[in-house]
Image (cartoon, rainbow, N blue to C red):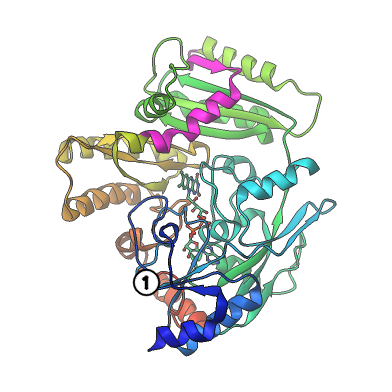
Amino acid sequence: MGLEAFIRAAGSVVDTEVEPRYLSGARYGTGGSPAVCRPGTAADVAHLLQRAQEHGVRLLPQGAHTGLVKAATPQGEVVLSTERLRGVFELDALDRTLRVSAGFRLSEVNERLRPHGLQFAIDLSADPSIGGMLAHNTGGTRMCRYGDVRANTLALEVVLPDGEVLTLGRGLAKDNAALALQHLFIGSSGALGVITEATLRLQALPRHTAVALVAPASLEAVWPLYQRFTQAWGGLVSAFEGLSANALAAAIEVRGGASPFAQGLPPYSLLIELAADFDGVDLRALLHGELEAAFERGDVLDAALDKDDALWALRHAVSEGLRERGAVIGFDISLPRRAVWAFRAEASDWLSGEFPPAQVCDFGHLGDGGQHFNLVWPRAAEPLDAQALQRLREGVYARVAAHGGSFSAEHGLGPLVQGTYRAHTASALRQASARVVAALTQGALGPGTFDFG
Ligand SMILES: Cc1cc2nc3c(=O)[nH]c(=O)nc-3n(C[C@H](O)[C@H](O)[C@H](O)COP(=O)(O)OP(=O)(O)OC[C@H]3O[C@@H](n4cnc5c(N)ncnc54)[C@H](O)[C@@H]3O)c2cc1C
């Protein structure tokens, strides 16, 4: 049989005792796999991919398994874990670049960079692998300042399913000497090749930061505040996050603290961070002054300041807090800024009419138009069956589309959004994508349950 022959040919990096962590991701259930491969080098990866192709076995690349669209959870595929791809860690402090193997975790990369005053400036509440971040083009809370993974990647090493190892880019800041194929692999959700190494663009660590949790006077006051901050302080604005009262309450509950506001929870809050990588600027005074002026204008009702770590801890506790409250139905969407509130109102109205138990607990990266429009379905309510859940999902996505938004802002593509991809992606684009996947891989890699066509 193909699988047994593959396992024999693949050698010692394959294990048929599959530990549960390879089968269960951060959310959304458990899968199944007959084996896990743990290559240590690009040559190992090439060998495995060639043997898999020879024996008709489908491999599924997996990093830290924190992805949220089920793309790394095997449904019968053999797992290709990248966790042992850790041979390269080369810092160029002058060019501010890092050549790094795909198996490193984000936290470890940043710990090692800290003594050099540098960072890979993607921030999120999980600890993914570098390869997984590239494959899903991760965004995160500081995207409004530094951009996503794509914006911070200069070169890749990728192994194609036939074992060919491609070096894409030289890690230079400017380089137009070839087609920039690295961008094809960034955001490809593991379907085009195995990313074994990347050269990342680094940023200086901030020397000063100031954070405020702000209660705007109304939703209408939010974008004028955003414009005021970004026009006045430009690149100093390093986060502009939004939190509905439900999301903030869940975070406070799970951390067991009191409300950071004197007057109870406002319907919507903003977490605003200023950061500077140079001295000579008093960010706290600047933030206080800006918020005081907004208070005088009537744009802001209240603000909690000078508790930077505690405020970020609250923001990062939202996902866990929502899970404590019930079953989370997640939507990772983005919209033009002008459409954010109209979408929110329409989707919330529709949900309260059609699915009364659903609690809208939206939060996320408001500054870049992103929103985790997450719902909690309370445990006490009758569970949704698959058909009703699909109707709910499609109802929300239809409203996202009507406002010119995207159903996948930063979590990538995977089986969880397969139906939505089909419904909301133009047929010509799907066909062109399927041709690219087929040309590079004959569809032999990645989640067998996701089809680009
Ligand atoms: C609590 C929590 C908060 C999160 N917050 C955010 C957020 O703010 N912003 C955001 O963008 N995401 C967020 N995520 C999602 C997730 O962390 C990212 O999608 C992350 O980049 C996935 O990386 P990973 O290593 O866990 O990849 P995995 O989950 O292991 O894999 C993800 C995809 O990448 C593929 N893949 C993995 N490694 C490779 C490789 N070397 N070569 C080719 N393909 C590969 C897999 O096949 C799969 O398709 C969050 C997740 C959690 C659990």
Does 376 appear in magenta?
no
Asked if 59 appears above or below 404 in the picture, the reply is below
For disc 1, the marked residue is 451
Q: Nearer the viewer, residue 83 or 149?
A: 83
Q: Secondary structure at mark 1?
A: loop
Looking at numbered disc 1 in the image, what kind of residue is underneath it? Asp
Question: Which quadrant of the view contains residue 72?
Answer: bottom left
Q: Can residue 192 be seen in this snapshot?
A: no
Q: Can residue 347 be seen in this snapshot?
A: yes
Q: Quadrant of the C terminus?
A: bottom left
Q: Quadrant of the N terminus?
A: bottom left
Q: Nearer the viewer, residue 389 or 223?
A: 389
Label 1 C-beta lies within 8 Å of the nearest ligand 1 atom? no
Does 312 appear in magenta?
yes
What's the residue at 43%, 18% (across, down)?
217
- Residue 74 at x, y percent in the picture: 39, 66
In the displayed structure image, the side of residue 387 where residue 449 appears, left or right: right
In the displayed structure image, the side of residue 43 where residue 68 appears, left or right: left
What's the residue at 35%, 66% (across, down)?
32
- Residue 339 at x, y percent in the picture: 40, 40
Give the magenta range.
Answer: 298-321
Image mark count: 1
- Residue 131 at x, y percent in the picture: 58, 61
Question: Which quadrant of the view contains residue 180?
Answer: bottom right
- Residue 137 at x, y percent in the picture: 54, 56
What's the residue at 30%, 39% (across, down)?
375
